[in-house]
């Protein structure tokens, strides 16, 4: 059973700061350049807490985590962050242009607390594996600050947009931010007990699928277990919950972008040998961009409507790869049927492992594979010396949900939900 709970969010006080100057992208999307820009925007920018700069004199007891706790304490004491007076949920709308198109869409959901569940409970489902290092980093931050600064991006089924009907309003938003990607984020605080109760009742029978935030969710689970082990077993204790943004799977604004793969540092890579080996599983068409009016990504999208397809970028030019269904099915016979149909699985299990000989462990450790969301940057990497790049089509939410709800997981970087949820709109403080 999904338990949704209103909370008294910590929020930036607009009398003290401009919201545009203090909110950030999620911690794992912040590049060093973005970190520097956030630092320059405001002394109260959230980056100082969620991804602070390390110092040369850092040591046990004085480091990015201890400084994060000090910032949170000081900002609360100074009124930079204030706590809402009554428990609320927060209606959250993002308006944006879909990358690569002129389509302007909205993604609508709500921010609230959700009771933490182990995956085995069959309430919350994942679709990706996590890595130990990011989990340890986020756990240290949570231990020191006892607060959640970004929401877990959760999906649920609501084909009739029932929750939106309960929360939508014509009133001016309580918060509005235009981020660096020209995404408009608007938030309305909802404290009406009847509306909150109706949302809770509807969500009770929903299952939740983590779209983004797997590391932070598993961090919250680990911290919950630590607190329980220390003797705090109360079912309504603050550590039993995590801050989420829940969005319907049916939303037109639910956009998944592809994450392309760049293969590098293969000492014995030979293009002709690669093509010959790959022909067991794929048909090849050389792409001549000089005479072809459509781009490689357009050709890839068109081919993907009929089956699995990739564009392989080599130093001698691009090739369109179209899967031979029977050969692929035989090569992946040990996998569940839903997995066999996924582009990312065919890429990893066939092209990377069987054709190029890159082990699953090497992929997991990113020894020979890098990930890039920008197709032009992936092409540039090959020109700069990478062995080959594979341009991909995005996964479909139906594929992701089918696999996740069956208890399976996808390879790393299988999905890129766009846009990200802004950090700093609401903070869940456990104290």
Image (cartoon, rainbow, N blue to C red):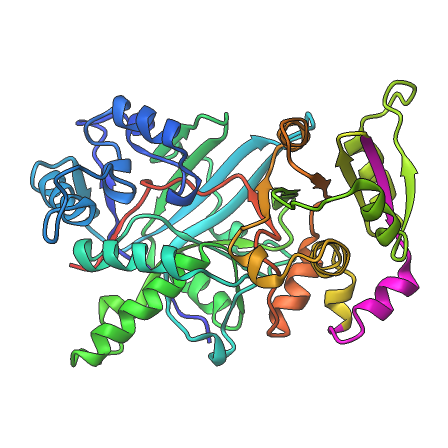
Which segment is the magenta one?
A: 317-336
Q: Outermost residue toward the front?
A: 268
The image position of residue 101, as x and y in percent, is 69, 28
Query: Relative to 400, is 47 on the left or the right?
Result: left
Q: Could one spot residue 79 in this view of the protein?
A: yes
Q: Nearer the viewer, residue 29 or 274?
A: 274
Total count of labels: 0
Vertical placement of residue 335 versus 50, above or below: below
Query: Relative to 116, is 238 on the left or the right?
Result: left
Residue at (75, 61) in percent of width and height? 354
Residue at (28, 44) in percent of width and height? 50
The image position of residue 161, as x and y in percent, is 59, 53
Q: Nearer the viewer, residue 248 or 269?
A: 269
Is the C terminus in the top left, top right, bottom left or bottom right quadrant? bottom left
Residue at (71, 39) in percent of width and height? 388
Query: Relative to 33, is 162 on the left or the right?
Result: right
Q: Could one spot residue 236 in this view of the protein?
A: no
Vertical placement of residue 222 versus 256, above or below: below
Vertical placement of residue 123 versus 292, above or below: below
Residue at (18, 37) in percent of width and height? 55
Res 92 quadrant in image: top left
Residue 353 in the magenta stretch? The answer is no
The image position of residue 166, as x and y in percent, is 49, 53
The image position of residue 373, as x and y in percent, is 60, 37
Q: Nearer the viewer, residue 371 or 2?
A: 371
Residue 333 in the magenta stretch? The answer is yes
Vertical placement of residue 218 versus 309, above or below: below
């Amino acid at each position: 059973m999904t338990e949704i709970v209103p909370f008294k969010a910590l929020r930036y006080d607009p009398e003290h700061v401009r919201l545009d100057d203090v909110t950030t992208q999620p911690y794992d999307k912040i590049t060093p350049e973005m970190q520097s820009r956030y630092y320059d925007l405001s002394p109260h920018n959230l980056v100082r807490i969620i991804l602070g700069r390390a110092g040369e004199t850092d040591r046990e007891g004085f480091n990015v985590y201890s400084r994060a706790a000090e910032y949170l304490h000081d900002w609360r004491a100074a009124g930079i962050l204030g706590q809402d007076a009554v428990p609320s949920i927060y209606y959250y709308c993002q308006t944006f242009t879909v990358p690569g198109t002129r389509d302007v869409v909205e993604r609508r959901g709500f921010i609230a607390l959700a009771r933490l569940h182990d995956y085995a409970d069959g309430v919350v489902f994942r679709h990706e594996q996590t890595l130990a290092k990011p989990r340890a980093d986020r756990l240290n931050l949570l231990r020191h600050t006892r607060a959640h600064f970004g929401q877990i991006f959760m999906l649920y089924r609501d084909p009739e947009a029932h929750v939106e009907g309960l929360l939508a309003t014509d009133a001016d938003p309580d918060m509005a931010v235009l981020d660096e990607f020209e995404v408009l984020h608007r938030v309305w605080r909802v404290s009406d007990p009847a509306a909150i109760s109706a949302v809770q009742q509807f969500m009770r029978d929903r299952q939740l699928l983590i779209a983004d935030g797997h590391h932070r969710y598993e961090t919250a689970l680990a911290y919950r277990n630590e607190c329980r082990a220390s003797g705090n077993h109360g079912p309504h204790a603050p550590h039993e919950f995590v801050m989420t943004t829940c969005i319907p799977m049916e939303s037109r604004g639910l956009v998944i972008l592809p994450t392309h793969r760049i293969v590098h540092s293969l000492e014995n890579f030979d293009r002709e040998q690669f093509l010959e080996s790959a022909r067991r599983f794929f048909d090849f068409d050389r792409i001549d961009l000089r005479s072809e009016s459509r781009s490689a990504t357009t050709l890839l999208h068109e081919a993907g409507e009929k089956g699995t397809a990739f564009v392989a970028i080599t130093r001698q030019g691009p090739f369109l790869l179209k899967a031979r269904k029977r050969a692929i099915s035989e090569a992946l016979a040990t996998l569940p049927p839903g997995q066999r149909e996924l582009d990312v699985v065919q890429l990893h299990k066939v092209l990377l492992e069987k054709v190029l000989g890159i082990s699953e462990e090497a992929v997991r450790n990113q020894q020979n594979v890098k990930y890039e969301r920008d197709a032009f940057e992936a092409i540039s990497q090959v020109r700069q010396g990478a062995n080959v790049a594979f341009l991909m089509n995005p996964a479909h939410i139906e594929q992701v949900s089918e696999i996740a709800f069956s208890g399976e997981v996808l390879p790393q970087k299988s999905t890129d939900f766009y846009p990200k949820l802004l950090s700093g709109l609401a903070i869940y403080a456990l104290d």
